[in-house]
Image (cartoon, rainbow, N blue to C red):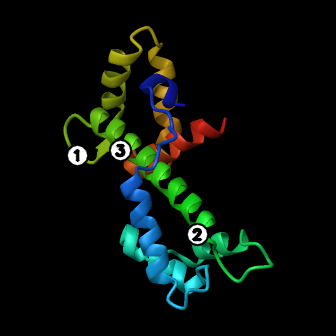
Amino acid sequence: MFLSLAGARPRASEVSASERRKWVEVFKACDEDRKGYLSREDFKVAIVMLFGYKPSKIEADSVMSSVDPNTSGISLEKFLNILKKKKEAQLYRNEIRHIFTAFDMHYRGFLTLEDFKRAFSRVAPKLPERTVLEVFREADQDSDGHVSFRDFEYAMNYGQAK
């Protein structure tokens, strides 16, 4: 929805050699028994080391369900692919945050209809006000007259799926 107006696009990012080395080192550190793969618990520890949070049960289940049934865990290559996707998602989320902040000129942590009108008048001056109102209403999930970052992020991602 907003992506085409704001110019945001998820981009593939290359992993630097130093970043890749760090990821491999973490993999090796978490593969304590040198079995060549990470178990579910090893994976969780690795994510804590790299991203500073413990993966949810749903995230761990999702990763483990994609593991080859002939192995008991996540191979180095699979681990590196997972990390690359996580990095891309983080970069995309940061881009959405940047756009939200540009809309939030009063630094209130939410957007009003006036914020939308002001932003859209700059990026799409010929867009009818009615369209801006419809976009705002769609983004304002709980109809409280404010679009939180969560509402905004949902609307940005929803636009990608269409």
Q: Of helix, strand and loop, which one carries label 1?
A: loop
- Asked if residue 60 lies left or right of residue 142, the reply is right
Depth check, mark 1 against mark 2: the one in front is 2
Closer to the chain start, of discs 1 and 2, is 2
Q: Which mark is first along the chain, 3 or 1?
A: 3
- Crowding at label 1, few (<14), some or many (≥20) Cα neighbours within 10 Å? few
Residue beneath label 1, please?
A: 108
Number of labels in the image equals: 3
Determine which quarter of the picture holds residue 41: bottom right
Q: State the SS at label 2.
A: helix
Figure quadrant of the N terminus? top right
| Vertical order, 154 against 160 (above or below) | below
Q: CA distance from mark 2 to mark 3?
A: 31 Å
Measured Cα–Cα span from mark 1 to mark 3: 14 Å
Residue 95 drawn at (x, y percent): 39, 40
Question: Furthest-top residue in view?
Answer: 126
- Secondary structure type for disc 3: helix
| Residue of label 3 | 97
* Crowd band around label 3 with a 10 angstrom C-alpha radius: few (<14), some (14–19), many (20+): some
Find out whether the residues at labels 2 and 3 contact each other: C-beta distance under 8 Å: no
Residue situated in front as seen by the camera: 112 or 44 = 44
Q: How packed is label 2: few (under 14 Cα within 10 Å), some, or many (20 or more)?
A: some
Residue placed under numbered mark 2 in the picture:
76
Q: Residue at x 42, y 72 (%)?
A: 25
